[in-house]
Amino acid sequence: MINFRTDLAAERRDIYQKANKLNEINGVESEKQDLSENISIERVKITNEEGEKIIGKPIGNYITVDLKKLKLAGEEEIEKYGEVISNELKKIIDMHIEKQDEILVVGLGNLYVTPDSLGPKVVQEIDVTRHIIKYLPQYVEEGTRPVSAISPGVLGTTGIETLEIIKGVIDNVKPKMLIVIDSLASRSIERISSTIQISDTGIVPGAGVGNTRSEISKSTLGIPVIAIRNSNSCRVCCTC
């Protein structure tokens, strides 16, 4: 069995194809789209149990967005990058829930460990609307989706599995979808801070580096789970 040591479905596919000298893998579909010199999108879809077993990822959709020269990008370019990611996210959300269904955003990771702090930092920037819609509806534009957000921390600092915290919130808030934001491990140093993977199969925190935590997915929570993950580490990371 191949030890992939990466969270990216596209990298796992490439590794397996190279190791077995294959052009195609049964149960794995993929396509690549170059939007510009610096932006490319690769869509990998695992369609059956054989593909799931080979790649080591659940059946579902995995969209990898590569943003080259991101560290040197100006304000206009960064806005364009954000628009591309936003469009891909909207498409995958619309596949699972209605326009006005409530979403809970969860920022996974440890705020105090740089390679693992992406989730908590992004949650601080989320425009949460659930409370405004509930208590001050006159100040909210009609059609605004209810959004709430939390950053549950990590087992090493809370003593509680992240899944247990999320389950408790879902039982009370009752969202229709969960979006989790987290760092991921890649095999390539070139992908650090420039590659984002969006998937609709949930997440197993730490799986890319062999530090597996409880699965956060539809099977464990009962609602669709979208994962947005940025490559913040290369093969090893500081999750705990």
Image: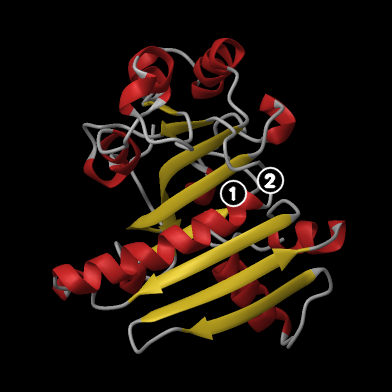
Q: Amino acid at mark 2?
A: His
Q: Tell me the residue at 19%/72% (across/down).
A: 76
User: Relative to 211, does residue 128 appear above or below in the rendering?
Assistant: above
Quadrant the C terminus occupies: top left
Percent x, y of residue 204: 57, 40
**Which numbered marker is on residue 121?**
none
Question: Under tag 1, what secondary structure?
Answer: helix
Question: Does residue 6 show up?
Answer: no
Quadrant that contains the N terminus: bottom right
Q: Is residue 237 above or below residue 18?
A: above
**Distance in Å between CA atoms under marks 2 and 1:** 6 Å
Q: Up-down: is 4 above or below 222?
A: below
Mark 2 element type: loop
| Side of 140 relative to 19 (left or right) | left
Nearest the eye: 140 or 222: 140
Residue 130 in the image: state x and y as whole percent: 42, 23
| Percent coordinates x, y for residue 7 in the rendering | 52, 56
Q: Which residue is mark 2?
A: 96
The kind of residue on which mark 1 rests is Ile
Q: Which residue is mark 1?
A: 93
Question: Would residue 68 be found to the left or right of residue 33 on screen?
Answer: left
- Report crowding for label 2: few under 14, some 14 to 19, many 20 or more residues within 10 A (C-alpha): some
